Image (cartoon, rainbow, N blue to C red):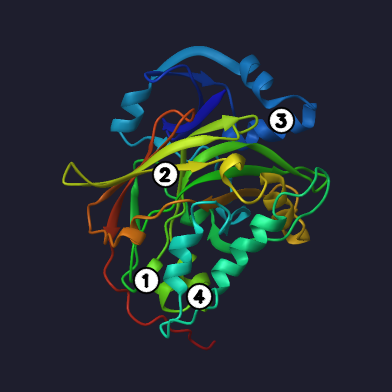
Amino acid sequence: MRIIQFKQDGRTCVGRVIDHDQVELVAADDGVYGLALQAIAENAALPALIERRATGTRVDYQALVDERRLLPPLTHPDPAHLLVSGTGLTHLGSAASRNAMHAKIAQDPAPSDSMKMFKLGVEGGKPAAGAAGVQPEWFYKGDGGIVVAPEADFPVPGFAQDAGEEPELAGVYVIDPQGRPRRIGFAIGNEFSDHVTERFNYLWLAHSKLRPCAFGPELLLGEAPADLQGTSRIVRAEDTLWEQPFATGEANMSHTLANLEHHHFKYAQFRRPGDAHVHFFGTATLSFADQVQTRDGDRFEISLQGFGRPLRNTVRYQPDAGLAQAEGL
């Protein structure tokens, strides 16, 4: 089952995807977040709850897209309680570009820290069921305030050096009243980073990740297929500037999803009841590796087999806001 969120008459509505053209309205007071909490309270499977609350009312999917009424498929009533994070160097196709990005200018034959991290994942990222494997690279992106809706613009701050896509699989979670993470489902993600800043020095990775992101438009409930094939595309003035297929899912990763989830949720601060989480599982391809530089108005389009409509967002560069200064009280 795939579901979406959208705006209608000032409300956050939930729709069950029927096909490419139609969604069915689902009765929900607080969107997908409220449905997830209700499923937890009733000890019910979320898809079964959605089936029970389906209204039979059909909504035109394309109209939601054209009118920019789509929302991220999970929102929190208080955006500060939706935490966005991710892991890197988790895909079998990602190490070469990162290693080249961080290679030493002196042509030192020793592997970079990125390659060392990648090899750790290959050797220990897929432990036996019930065991913890090696921990991955981890980063924090922000809270719900940095999440951009599907079809909406990606604001690029004036101080940014780059605006590059990162097509990924994202996991979506809510923390139950007992402090246990409960996975709602999976979505297409565009983690969106500043690769020029990252390339200058890997210690600036944290800075490079503090950018907007998007996920959706559809949320796939249940387990994610092990082998997922997708396409990442950049469109400029309605012409394809760059396009590349990518593979994700556990069959194409150096870590299991369970291992990545463990190394995020093992921290007690990420198990606060009522919080929601979006966690990006890492990318396998980057246009930046092909020396692509995005411009204002470029559109990212990321599709993933089995996840319905593509995730699309347009780059919009913002003026420099000047020096950020703290004032004494």
Label 1: which residue?
196
Q: Which mark is residue 149?
A: 2
Give the x, y percent position of residue 67: 30, 33
Q: Residue furthest front?
A: 109
- Amino acid carrying label 1: it is Val
State the quadrant of the C terminus: bottom right
State the quadrant of the N terminus: top right
Kindly state the secondary structure of the residue where label 3 is placed: helix
First along the sequence among labels 1 and 4: 1
In 3D space, how far apart are the residues under numbered discs 3 and 1 (Cα atoms)? Answer: 44 Å
Label 4: which residue?
202
Q: Nearer the viewer, mark 4 or mark 3?
A: 4
Is label 3 in contact with label 2 (beta carbons under 8 Å)? no
- Amino acid carrying label 2: it is Ala
First along the sequence among labels 2 and 4: 2
- Amino acid carrying label 3: it is Gln
Q: Dot 3, crowdedness within 10 Å: few (<14), some or many (≥20)?
A: some
Kindly state the secondary structure of the residue where label 2 is placed: loop
Residue at 56%, 59% in the rendered image: 88
Give the x, y percent position of residue 22: 40, 17
- Amino acid carrying label 4: it is Tyr
Label 3: which residue?
38
Kindly state the secondary structure of the residue where label 4 is placed: helix
Is label 3 in contact with label 1 (beta carbons under 8 Å)? no
Judging depth in this view, the residue of 236 and 259 nearest the camera is: 259
The quarter of the picture where residue 8 lies is top left
Is label 2 in contact with label 4 (beta carbons under 8 Å)? no
First along the sequence among labels 4 and 3: 3
Decide if residue 15 is in sight here: yes
